[in-house]
Amino acid sequence: EPEVTQTPSHQVTQMGQEVILRCVPISNHLYFYWYRQILGQKVEFLVSFYNNEISEKSEIFDDQFSVERPDGSNFTLKIRSTKLEDSAMYFCASSGRQGSSGNTIYFGEGSWLTVV
Amino acid sequence: EDQVTQSPEALRLQEGESSSLNCSYTVSGLRGLFWYRQDPGKGPEFLFTLYSAGEEKEKERLKATLTKKESFLHITAPKPEDSATYLCAVQAYNDYKLSFGAGTTVTVRA
């Protein structure tokens, strides 16, 4: 079973600090995503990434956020100057390709971020 | 804007008591409708993708169906290990992102 892996599983940070969440997508996938889920709420889209650039982002994904694929395997989400309302579970996801077949989007187990 | 509404919010079943979950959606051209299972504190686990009205897919005790306005997830003779939150999400034809519903939390009692 292919797997998206995320680190850390849980991070506590002080308000105003920078946080980097890391993900290793499935090895032959081309599309990468970050989603978040505030406790008790829906899973929300943040950003999608393809061919080394952002392909789409939501209103949530403002200048506080950035993504990077620093090498051939990792995909990171950086949150600058964290706020209390950034506390959430952040999910990385990946898929092989868009299209009418084989479009399976796999999610990691998540990184739980607590801002205090 | 894409909208996904799931009902009921919660469902309590006796082991072996079959039932259905509903996902109503509004999307500007559907590329795919996704069903996921989510256990507490975990990431969504992929179950099915449906692409066109009339399509059905099965996996163990789960069967997903799709019409032009809604999808159903049928749980046949559930077991306690089927207890989870089931999430529905849509992907529009001209889009990459998934838009999720709030989920249906299913509890199966032995």
Image (cartoon, grey):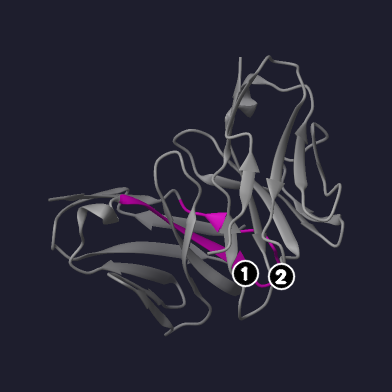
In the drawing, does residue B110 fall left or right of residue B87?
left
The residue pinned by badge 1 equals B28
- 1 or 2: tag closer to the N-terminus: 1
Kindly report the distance in space between the C-alpha atoms of the residues bearing marks 1 and 2.
8 Å
Q: Split into 4 quadrants, where in the image is the N terminus of chain B?
A: bottom right
Query: Overall secondary structure of the magenta stretch?
Result: strand
Q: Is residue A96 above or below residue A65?
A: below
| Chain of the residue where label 2 is placed in the rendered structure | B
Q: Secondary structure at mark 1?
A: loop
Q: Secondary structure at mark 2?
A: loop
Residue A46: give x, y in percent of width and height. Answer: 69, 46
Above or below residue B82? Residue A67 is above
Answer yes or no: is residue A60 visible: no
Amino acid type, residue under disc 2 in the picture: Asn
Q: Which residues are magenta?
A: B84-101
Instruction: Note whether residue A28 is visible.
Output: yes
Q: In the depicted view, which residue is nearer to us: B51 or A52? A: A52
The kind of residue tagged 1 is Ser
In the rendered image, the vertical position of residue A1 relative to residue A10, given as above or below: below
Location of mark 2 (residue): B94
Residue at 58% over, 69% down: A104
Does the residue at mark 1 contact the one at mark 2 (Cβ under 8 Å)? yes
Q: What percent of the width, then of the height, locates residue A101?
A: 61, 81
Q: Residue B46's x, y, as percent?
A: 49, 62
Q: Residue at 58% x, 73% y: name it.
A: B30
Determine crowd level at label 2: few under 14, some 14-19, many 20+ residues with C-alpha closer than 10 A: few
